[in-house]
Amino acid sequence: MDETSIVLSIGPFGITRTVVTTWGILVALWVICMLLAQRLRTEPGQLQTVVEGIVLAQENAIAQLLPGEERRLLPFIGGLWVFIVVANLLGVVPGLSSPTADLSATVALAILVFLSTHWFGIRSQGLHSYLQHYLRPSPILLPFHVIGEITRIVALAVRLFGNMMSLEMAALLVLLVAGFLVPVPILALHIIEALVQAYIFGMLALIYVAGGIHSQQLKRREQQEKQE
Amino acid sequence: MTDMSWFVLASTVAAVLGIALGVILPAFAMGRAISSALDALARQPEAAGTLSRTLFVGLAMIETMAIYCLVIALLLLYANPLTG
C-alpha cells in the first residue's frame, strides 16, 4: 500500500485505513449483535425476524451442500458472508473505502479459509487419514494436490480484491472523465457486484471446507463397504 | 524517443491487448456456461437451486481469469516493476 493510506503509526508499524475500517466493521457488527441478542423474544419483532431470516437463509445454504454439518460451519461461513457483504458495501459510502479493495485484507480472509479447510477436515476424521487423502489415488499426484491447494486460495484472494479494486477504480475513472453524477450507474453495479462477490467468496469457502470433510466421508463409506 | 518511452509504449500496447483478449475469451466461456445452464433449466425447472449455485461458482471461476488479466494490465500501467 502507498504511504497516503497510513492513518497513524505505532513505532515502525503504520496502521492503514484497511485495518481501521476492518476493526470498525468488527466492532459495529459486535455491538449490533449484542444489542439484538439482549432482547430476543419468542414473539419476534420486525428486527428479530429480519435477522432470523438472514441466519436461516445461511443455514439452509450450508445444509443444501453439507447436510448435518450446518451447525458446525455456520459461525465461520456465516461470519464470512456477513463481514464481506458489509466490507464490500462500505465502498459505496462516501468517505470510506472498502477494506476488501486492499489485497492484504483479502489475503488474510483467504488464509483463514485455507486454515479452516484443514481444521475442519482434520477434525472430521483425524490427522492421519486427512493427510492420507493427499496420496490418493496415487502418491504421484501429491504435488498436484499441493499446487491445487495453493492456487485456489490465491485465486480466492485475487478474485475478491480484483473485483472490488477494479470497480472502485472504474468509478473513479468515469468521475475523472465525465464528472458529477455520471458514475452513479457504475456505483449501482458496485452494489450488485459487492453482494455477488460476497456470496461467491462464502460459497467457495464452503465448497473447499466441504471438500475436506466430504472426501473423508466418502472414504469412510468405501471402507465400510469393504468390511461388509 | 528514448528507450524508456519505447518501453512505456510497449507495455501500454501489451496491457491493452492483454485486457482485450482476457475479456473476449472469458466472455465466450461465460456465454457458453450460461446458455447450457439455461438449456438444463428449461428441461428441468425443479433443479433451479442446484443449477444456479453451480452456475454462480463456475462463473466466478471463469471471471477470475478476466480478473487476472485486469490485475496484470493494471500492474503494467500503474506499477510496472521494470520502469521503477
Image (spheres, rainbow, N blue to C red):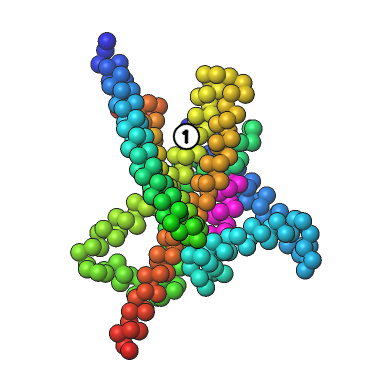
Q: The N terminus of chain B lies in which quarter of the figure?
A: top left
Apparent side of residue A76 relative to residue A123 in the rendered image (left or right): right
Assign the C terminus of chain B to one quadrant of the image. Answer: top left
- Residue A49: image location, x then y, percent: 72, 59
Side of A77 where B3 appears, left or right: left
Quadrant of the image occupied by residue A147:
bottom left
Q: Residue at x 23, y 63 (%)?
A: A141
B19, above or below B60, in the image: above
- Asked whether residue B16 is in view, the answer is yes
Looking at the rendered structure, the number of numbered marks drawn on it comes to: 1
| Magenta stretch contains residue A80 | yes
Where A27 falls versus A162 (above or below)? below
Which chain does the numbered disc 1 sit on? A
Type of amino acid at the residue the image marks with label 1 = Ser
Give percent across and percent down for residue A105.
50, 46
The secondary structure making up most of the magenta span is helix
- For disc 1, the marked residue is A166
x, y percent for residue A158: 42, 44
- Over which residues does the magenta segment extend? A77-87
Asked if B50 appears above or below A219 in the picture, the reply is: above
Q: Is residue A37 magenta?
A: no
Horizontal and vertical percent for residue A221?
Answer: 37, 79
